[in-house]
Amino acid sequence: MYWAGSNDEYPITSDANVVKGQKVCGSGAFYGTTSCGEVTEVSVVLESYYPGLGVKKVKLSRANFCAVPGDSGSPVHYNGVAYGILTGGSGQCNTYFSSVIAAEEVLKVDVIHAGTHYLLRNTNSAGSPDVAFEYGLSGDKAVVGDWNNDGTDTIGVYRPSNRTFYLRNSNSSGAADIAVDWGNFGDLPIVGDWNNDGTDTFGVYRPGSTAFYLRNSNSSGAADISAVFGANGDTPIVGDWNGDGTMTIGVVG
């Protein structure tokens, strides 16, 4: 889903409730996405007047990003996650917004969840999924790895449209814990523990040159390992082919 702000559209991968202290941004007509701040209060009960309905008590959250009259109805979001709908601003960077999840529940709609569906089992057997959630956008390529060396594999996606990896440290919806723009357009994402340090990191296979480019950390920078291997038309694969704990490259022709 893309959420329109003042001048652009912003890709939304999921929705969530805010917590105090987290970062959010408002995309109103005046300030645009340059106005970001921290959530200062959650679920504040206020009284508001509604024509034809009178005074009603509503629950709102407050953040210290800036907004001005006329910005009401604009999105409150951060890093691909939709959090709320702006309800009012004083111009003094003291802004209230309602929960987008609460709005979905009242209207009985599910407008945010258009990403990839993940259904995960904790045993190699038939049955219902132990974990189910959505993450990413249409067109993303799923990747899986232990990104923080905690012993648990978690999900991520590679987005070909902007050559960016978005990695989560938990198997759940939400903003990416790691986001790195890396590689060239047309690259294919691969993942492995290339140096046997316990952390899975990303890499790419470049079909045009049949070259592998691998990073030993989930961060920007030049490839730590590069190798030309295979032939045009091959499909890249990776694995620990000799049981030494290091993932290495391969191709299927």
Image (cartoon, rainbow, N blue to C red):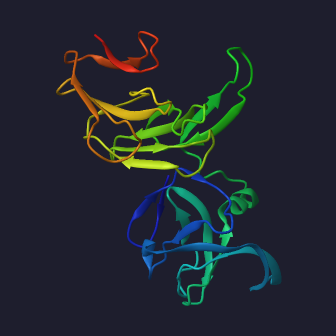
Determine the image quadrant of residue 63: bottom right
Measured as percent of width and height from the top left, residue 97 is found at 65, 74
Residue ID at (56%, 67%): 23
Answer whether residue 48 is visible to the viewer in this image: yes
Indicate the quadrant containing the C terminus: top left, top right, bottom left or bottom right.
top left
* Camera-nearest residue between 111 and 45: 45
Horizontal side of 128 relative to 190 (left or right) equals right
In the visual, does 247 lie left or right of 43?
left
x, y percent for residue 24: 56, 68
Q: Is residue 128 left or right of residue 222?
A: right
Instruction: From this view, report whether residue 104 is shown above or below residue 33.
Output: above
The picture quadrant where one finds residue 191 is: top left
Residue 121 drawn at (x, y percent): 68, 24
Q: Answer with the quarter of the image where residue 232 lies.
A: top left
| Residue at x-position 55% and y-position 35% | 149
As displayed, is residue 67 above or below residue 163? Answer: below
Residue 206 visible in the snapshot: no
Residue shown at 55%/52% (left/top)? 175
Q: Position of residue 227 (x, y in %)?
A: 22, 24
Residue 117 vs 209, above or below: the answer is below
Label tally:
0
What residue is at 46 percent from the left and 69 percent from the top? 5
Q: Nearer the viewer, residue 64 or 152?
A: 152
Q: Is residue 147 left or right of residue 53?
A: left
